[in-house]
């Protein structure tokens, strides 16, 4: 199901300065190196500056390819430090 413009504006700010310097759209792929730009969970080690690589991109409804303007349901990342994120439950808590 494509995302309507109003919903997209709630997810992705229009101005690059409001997105941590990112443009409105970016291309991602498996193997891409990524870095957290803010603390998500200090206890789990998900902190600003944590580095990792994208291992999988999961699309809504089990699709293997992006359709229209859909955003991925999940982006799986393997962090360089083996203990990063291991204390989190599958629901993110």
Image: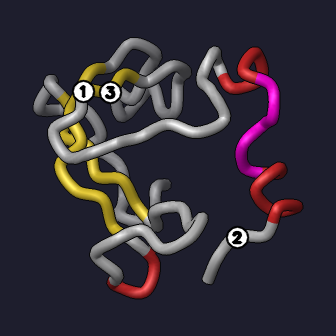
How crowded pointer 2 is (Cα within 10 Å; few <14, some 14-19, many 20+) is rated as few
Q: Are marks 3 and 1 in contact (CB under 8 Å)?
A: yes
Q: Is residue 40 magenta?
A: no
> Residue reaching furthest front?
68
Which residue is under mark 2?
3
Residue 37, image x and y in percent?
51, 19
What are the residue bounds of the magenta stretch?
A: 11-15
Which residue is under mark 3?
34
Judge whether 32 appears above or below 6 on screen: above
Which residue is under mark 1?
33
Residue 43, image x and y in percent?
41, 30
Q: CA distance from mark 3 to mark 2?
A: 25 Å
Identify the colour scheme used. secondary structure
State the predominant SS element of the stretch in magenta.
Answer: loop
For the point 27% across and 21% down, the residue is 51
Judge whether 47 appears above or below 4 on screen: above
Judge whether 44 appears above or below 37 on screen: below
Element on which disc 2 rests: loop
For the point 33% across and 67% down, the residue is 58
For the point 60% across and 64% down, the residue is 69
Q: Nearer the viewer, residue 48 or 44?
A: 48
Q: Nearer the viewer, mark 1 or mark 2?
A: 2
**Quick check: can you spot residue 34?**
yes
């Amino acid at each position: 199901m494509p995302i309507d413009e109003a919903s997209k504006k709630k997810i992705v700010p229009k101005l690059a300065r409001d997105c941590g310097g990112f443009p409105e759209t970016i291309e991602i792929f498996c193997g891409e190196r990524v870095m957290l730009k803010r603390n998500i969970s200090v206890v789990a080690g998900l902190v600003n500056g944590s580095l990792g690589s994208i291992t999988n991109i999961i699309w809504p409804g089990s699709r293997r390819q992006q359709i229209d303007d859909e955003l991925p349901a999940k982006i799986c990342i393997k962090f360089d430090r083996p203990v990063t994120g291991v204390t989190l439950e599958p629901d993110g808590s």
